[in-house]
Image (cartoon, grey):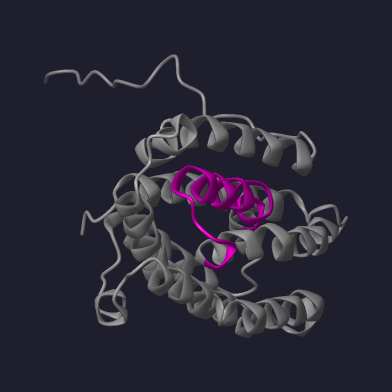
Amino acid sequence: MTATTSTSLSGYAPPARDTRPLPERLDEVWADLERRLADVPILRALAAGDVTLEDYHRLLHNLRQQVVDGSLWIARAASNFDVEHFDLRSAAMAHAQEEHRDHLLLQRDYLAIGGSLQELRAGRKNIGSQALSGYMFSIASGPNPVAALGAMFVIEGLGAQKAGEWGRRFADVLGLADSQVHFMIYHAEADVEHTGTMEGFLTSDRLDADAQDAIVSCARVVARLYVMQLTELDEI
C-alpha cells in the first residue's frame, strides 16, 4: 500500500474584516477612483486642453446609453426594499423619479453640438456601460439591496464633485455655451443635495458590519466599471 501525502496551502490567510468606520472606507474608494480617472484618455485630454468637439460628442453618446438605465435600476432597487426599510424605499423612489428625465438633458446637449437624434437613440452601450448596468440590475434585484448605497456614493459623488468641473472645462476649451454643457452643470448642482441625503443613510447606526461590507464592495466595483465606461468609448 502506498501512503498518500496530503497537501495544504500555506502562507495564505483570508483578509480580516475591515472594522474602520464606513465613511473612512468609502473615502479610500473615492481616492482610488480619482487616481484612476486621471488616467482616462479623454479626461487627460480635457485637463491638458487638447480635447476636441468630436471627443465631447463621443462622450455624450456613450454616457447616454447608461444614463437611460440609471433610473430603471434605482426603481427596481426601490421595489425590493421591504417595509422595514421603508425610508430607503421612499428615498429610492423619489430619486428614480428625479433621474428618469436625465437622458433628455443629455440629449439636448448632444443635439446642441450638432448630433443626430436618430444616431443617439440607435446607440449601444459600450463594454463598460454594459458591465455597469448589468451589475447594478443584479444588485438592485436582490432583497433589501442596501449595497446599492455604494453605487450611489460613487455616481452621485461624480455628479457633485466632477461633472461641473468637466462641463465648465469642456465649455472653456471648446468655446461652448451653457446650453451645450447643461447636463454636466445641472448634476453639479442637483447631486449635492442627493449626496447629503445619502450621507444620512451611510452614517446611520442601522448598517451592520455585513451591510457596510456590501456597500464598500459595491462602491469599489462601480468605481472600476465607471472608469471602464469612460475609457472604452465606442467599444461595444
Q: For residue 59, what is the image quadrant?
A: bottom left
Question: In the picture shown, does residue 132 fall above or below 138?
Answer: above
Q: Position of residue 214 (x, y in %)?
A: 61, 53
Q: Residue at x 77, y 33 (%)?
A: 20
**Quadrant occupied by the N terminus:** top left
Query: What residue lies at 45% left-to-right and 20% top-to-bottom?
Result: 12
Q: Which stretch is magenta?
A: 156-179
- The quadrant of the image that shows the C terminus is bottom left
User: In this figure, what is the number of numbered marks?
Assistant: 0
- Quarter of the image for residue 5 reads top left
Measured along the vertical axis of the image, is residue 85 above or below residue 187? below
Extreme-right residue of the structure: 205
Residue 178 screen position, x and y as percent? 59, 62
- What is the chief secondary structure element of the magenta stretch? helix
Q: Is residue 27 left or right of residue 38?
A: right
| Residue closest to the eye, 24 or 171 | 171
Image point (30%, 66%), residue name? 125
Q: Between residues 39 and 128, which one lies in front from this camera angle? A: 39
Q: Is residue 130 left or right of residue 122?
A: right
Most extreme residue toward the left is 1
Q: In the rendering, at what x and y percent does residue 220 appear?
A: 54, 44
Q: Is residue 209 magenta?
A: no
Relative to 205, is 94 above or below? below
Closer-to-camera residue (179/204): 179
Point 67% across, 47% down: residue = 161
Q: Is residue 16 above or below residue 95?
A: above
Quadrant for residue 117, please give it.
bottom left
| Residue 119 showing in the rendered view | yes
Question: How far across and down, in percent of the image, does residue 49 sit?
Answer: 44, 34
Q: Look at the image and say whether residue 158 sits in the magenta stretch.
A: yes
Evaluate whether residue 141 shows in this view: no
What is the residue that sits farthest to the top in this orientation? 11
